[in-house]
Image: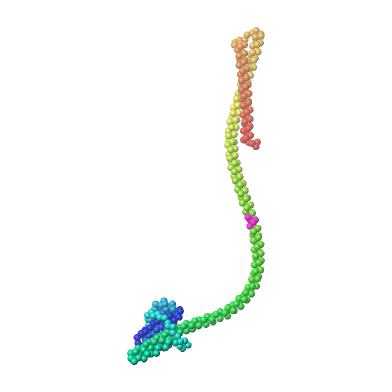
Amino acid sequence: MSDAVFELRAFEHVEAIPGRALLRIAAEPTFEPSGAALIIDDGEPVHPLPAPAGPPGVARAAFSLPAERVDGARRFVLELPDGERIPLPKPTKRTAARVTLAGAGLPGPAPAPAPVVDAGAGDLIAELERRLAAERARRVSADTAAETSAAARSASETRLKSLDAELADARADLVSTRDDLATVREDLASTRGDLAGALEELRDAQGAVELGRTQANHARAEAEAAETTLIQRGAEIQLLRQTLADRDAHAQHTYLQWEQITAELSVEIDVARQVAADFQQHARNLQLELADSRLELTSLRALREAHEQAVAAGSAVDGDSGDPAVVAAKLNAAAAALEEARSRASEAEAALAARETELGRLRGQLNPGQ
């Protein structure tokens, strides 16, 4: 760009079509619009649309881009063809005029009313200025419509190219899909054969599984019966163990009682033996006393017989021994002593027999097997 100072005359944001925004720049001095670019927030440069030539000395450029990119932008920069970057303010929003072109076969703008010629020169100048302003408005509307049409055409061409690419991809995908379909059909035929074999194997396997299930059910029933029997046997064993423990406890208690009774019987036997020995000694003493009494009784009887013989012969016996009363008293005393000795001997013999019987009973309790 030359040393002339860049002067921005207009930077507008026109809502051309839904979803698209049209940014228009008018500046002095002139520059080649096709070589310029618009940079938003340091993003990718946006190149201008083809635009009709502007007034002499004024450069005009229009840029089409998504509306959301413009709405959220914070920084705008115009890059000139020589690389110089000019910061731009936020664009002024305006609505595109609904203008039609006569060249497209549509009715054009209404013709300006015929000038009213007045005798005064002031009225003529005013009429000329009014017509000039109307012409300028029509020119701006036409430019806006052209730019809007160019933006729409560019968007349509971009969409058409995208659709052509998608159509080519779809055709390629269709050819690939047809090849894949043929391959899938072949695989499907092969798979059907494999599936038939697998189905037959599956049926065989199902039969084997059913047989296995039946056998498993039988085995499970047998196992449950065996488990029930095992539980019953366990209960019986537990009962037998309890019974055996009770019997062991009873046997232990009986054994302790038997030992106690044995000890007591041993003591009683020892006492009975001692008593029997005492009675035997007493019996021997009584037998000796009885023998002495018998001897004394025999002596007294002999003495009485001698006395009776002496009395019968008329001779007297010396001393008190010859007195019949004394002899009779001694004889009676000896007889009484003899009877007492006999009674005591009988009692001793009865007591000894009773002790011997009790001793035999204790021996039988002590040794029941003998």
The answer to which of 309 and 363 lies nearer the viewer is 363
Q: In which quarter of the image is the N terminus?
A: bottom left
Relative vertical location of residue 317 with respect to residue 283 in this rendering, above or below: above
Q: What stretch is highlighted in magenta?
A: 219-224
- The percent coordinates of residue 346 (x first, y second) are 63, 23
Relative vertical location of residue 105 with respect to residue 186 in this rendering, above or below: below
Magenta span contains residue 221: yes
The answer to which of 123 and 325 lies nearer the viewer is 123
Return the residue found at the far top.
314
The answer to which of 16 and 53 lies nearer the viewer is 16
- The percent coordinates of residue 32 (x first, y second) are 41, 87
Scheme of image coloration: rainbow
Query: Going 63% across and 52% down the picture, which residue do you hit?
Result: 229
Kindly tell me whether residue 1 is visible in this rendering. Answer: no
The answer to which of 290 and 362 lies nearer the viewer is 362
Magenta span contains residue 333: no
**What main secondary structure does the magenta stretch of the protein show?**
helix
Relative vertical location of residue 340 with respect to residue 7 in this rendering, above or below: above
Residue 197 picture quarter = bottom right
Query: Going 63% across and 8% down the picture, which residue do you hit?
Result: 316
Return the residue found at the far front.
119
Relative vertical location of residue 237 with respect to residue 13 in this rendering, above or below: above
Position of residue 9 in the picture relative to residue 183 (left or right): left
Q: In which quarter of the image is the C terminus?
A: top right
Residue 204 picture quarter = bottom right
- The percent coordinates of residue 363 (x first, y second) are 62, 33
- The percent coordinates of residue 74 (x first, y second) are 39, 77
Kindly tell me whether residue 340 is visible in this rendering. Answer: yes
Query: Going 47% across and 84% down the picture, which residue do you hit?
Result: 153
